[in-house]
Amino acid sequence: MEMVTRIGKFDHDDDHLNLRLGLPGTSEAREKQAPSLGSRTSNKRALPEDAEDPGSNSKCSRTESANADSALPTKTQVVGWPPIRSYRKNNTQSTVMKTPQSDVAGGNNNYVKVSVDGAPYLRKIDLRVYKNYPELLKALESMFNLTIGNYSEREGYNNGSDYAPTYEDKDGDWMLVGDVPWERLRIMKGSEARGLGCA
Amino acid sequence: MLRMASSFPEEVLEHVFSFIQSDADRNSISMVCKSWYEIERWCRRRIFVGNCYAVSPRMVIRRFPDVRSIELKGKPHFADFNLVPEGWGGYVDPWISAMAMAYPWLEEIRLKRMVVTDESLELIAKSFKNFKALVLSSCEGFSTDGLAAIAANCRNLRELDLRESDVDDLSGHWLSHFPDTYTSLVSLDISCLGSEMSFTALERLVGRCPNLRSLRLNRTVPIEKLANLLRQAPQLVELGTGAYSAELRPEVFSNLAGALSGCKELKSLSGFWEAVPAYLPAVYSICPGLTSLNLSYAAIQSPHLIKLLSHCPKLQRLWVLDYIEDVGLEALAASCKDLRELRVFPSDPFVAEPNVSLTEQGLVSVSGGCPKLHSVLYFCRQMSNAALTTIARNRPNFTCFRLCIIEPRTPDYLTLGPLDAGFGAIVEHCKDLRRLSVSGLLTDRAFEYIGTYAKKLEMLSLAFAGDSDLGLHHVLSGCENLRKLEIRDCPFGDKALLANAAKLETMRSLWMSSCMVSYGACKLLGQKMPRLNVEVIDERGPPDTRPESCPVEKLYIYRSVAGPRFDMPGFVWTMDEDSSALRLS
């Protein structure tokens, strides 16, 4: 099972693309951090992409499935169909083009696909290699040659960074990397994988 | 003479009964007369509870005071496919707590699809001095801390099997909790764990347990280290490798091949995570004796598979990915005449177009070439009535036939009609069929065939099939031995269910999700059938906030002597006998 992480580019000049920390639809001050509402309760930040902005050049679709990099068209996934156990889904090597690959998606290796707005192809990283968020962010920065900067709970990555790393959680919401404690993120992998795998 | 029964010494009867192990026979014995019931219940040592909510721990303990081995199953089978929401139930804690006090000599606990906690594992470790076997199959809710308690305290442990469980893997350190004096391990399956363990601790454990027969490693054990372990345990009968890939290095290969050739008893291989073809030949030396091979996590292409299988004439069980393709299955049919069980899993199930050349032809080949084949699980993308009929005629000895055509409602690709006749042929010819899963485009006629012919059928799985209640009615009224029925996304509603309500008491359980059973019908069923637990699972909120005619999301009905359970989460409602009275029209 694969998770997709997206790095969205900020355009500081345009208010609509800035990280919104308030309720969606309200004109909120950037400093205020209020939990965003949704049908699910959580302290989720509203994302810049929530706003309709023709200027945004975000290419990734929200409904990326585990086969986003497959050359073949994917079908709409029905929950629990085909009837394959989550354990098997999480542990089957994914291969494209009929060649066995040495890396494994999902499961205990915690490989995650990373795409960057504007980059021509995705990369894969193994979350298990990193012990904490700063290490992960440094790796992303060097891999994609961009700046993400430091995470702050209040402002996210707003302090001078060009990019903000986000990921899609089991509810299908785009979350900012760093909100959830590192250990919780690792543990969530199992349940997230289950939820995403069958959405 | 009337006193004959009591003049026959109890001890003799007990001795005779000790040769009777099957539950069905034990149940029959207990019904002969009161004294046999009494003798039997005192000497029954092994209990199987197919649905943990069908009976309460207290009832089991009251009837059987001296049990040594218990097997419990929790969640419905469709939980494997995420159809049962988190928190539904299946908690083992009440059982462990009760047994900790009642069965101090308990030796074996086998659980499937249950929620286990670290507290329970610690209680097991403390309470049962002669504890020997813990098998947790598709369980969840516990961490490696619980395993550490088992390792540290169960001096006589023989079997620790975590197959496919979802373990909160905090660290690999738990393995080091087996004391140096511990030497009784016979079977260890830790393939589902993700953390790296101390290899030295693992090696020492394996080295000091001379009775170790079955070892299933997790993928963090690299292929380079496998040889070391094998040399410590050449008596292994079953091996699950760790990660089976590395750059091809001659010394690693020859070391592994050498170590494997020393394992003269090896009959079963599994694991092969991330397998690369280059290292497959290392197993060739033991292939002639191999009876079971699980390559279903290995993305190996058919030419390599064919080569490997050609070395395995005694193979009885093969689990493989669809990379094997039709050509590989044809080769399998030629090389492995002793094959009994085949499972072919899809490598890329969410892709619309086929990514491999595996069709119905593969299954036709195997059913034609393998006279002992009786159990099949086959995922494919196309099927025809003609093929199914050929398969049925070739192989009337199927006991388990599970076919999954990946796209729901796929018709016969030759005629573009339903696959009714094909499955009809399967049930007609395979008179001993006990388990069946159908797929593809099916009308009520398919269910008419099933009801008419599948007289020995015990478990049936349906999805996206049928036209009307008649379909369900055929199954419920025709399949005399049906125990478990699971249905999803079929147009079955109230009529068939209510008309066959009595049938449900003869079954273990019925699952229906995304069908058309109304809340009103559920209430009626709950009212009329006190020995059934009718559970409505609905995440939209309480069903009485919607009209009674509104279909419920999911329905789980099971017979029980324990009455309704009390550990239900907020999205499950049990329809009680004394729930609000229905207004009779």
Image: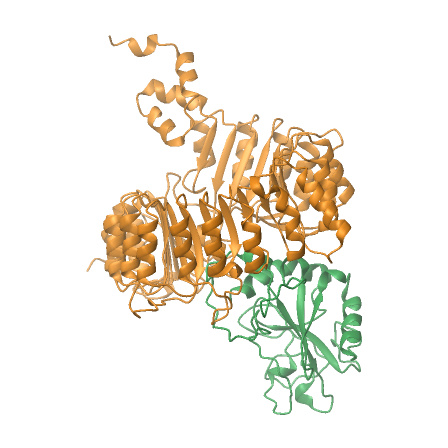
Name the spot of residue A127 as percent of width and height, x first.
71, 63
Q: Residue at x 51, y 49 (%)?
A: B318
What hue does chain A carry in this figure? green
Between A5 and B104, the one nearer to me in the picture: A5
Residue B269 sits in quarter: top right
In the displayed structure image, the side of residue B356 where residue B179 appears, left or right:
right
Q: Is residue B204 above or below residue B476?
A: above
Does residue B553 appear in this view? yes
| Residue positioned most to the left | B585
Q: Residue at x 39, y 15 (%)?
A: B13
Does residue B493 appear in this view? no
How many numbered tags mark residues here? 0
Q: Quadrant of the N terminus of chain A?
A: bottom right
Name the spot of residue B282 as percent of width and height, x first.
66, 48
Between B530 and A64, the one nearer to me in the picture: A64
Q: Residue at x 25, y 61 (%)?
A: B444
Q: Residue at x 45, y 59 (%)?
A: B379
Residue B10 sits in quarter: top left
Q: Is residue B17 above or below residue B366?
A: above
In the displayed structure image, the side of residue B46 where residue B443 appears, left or right:
left
In the displayed structure image, the side of residue B470 where residue B382 appears, left or right:
right
Residue B41 sits in quarter: top left
What hue does chain B carry in this figure? orange
Name the spot of residue B355 as percent of width and height, x first.
51, 68
Colouring used for the render: by chain
Name the spot of residue A95 as percent of width and height, x first.
60, 66
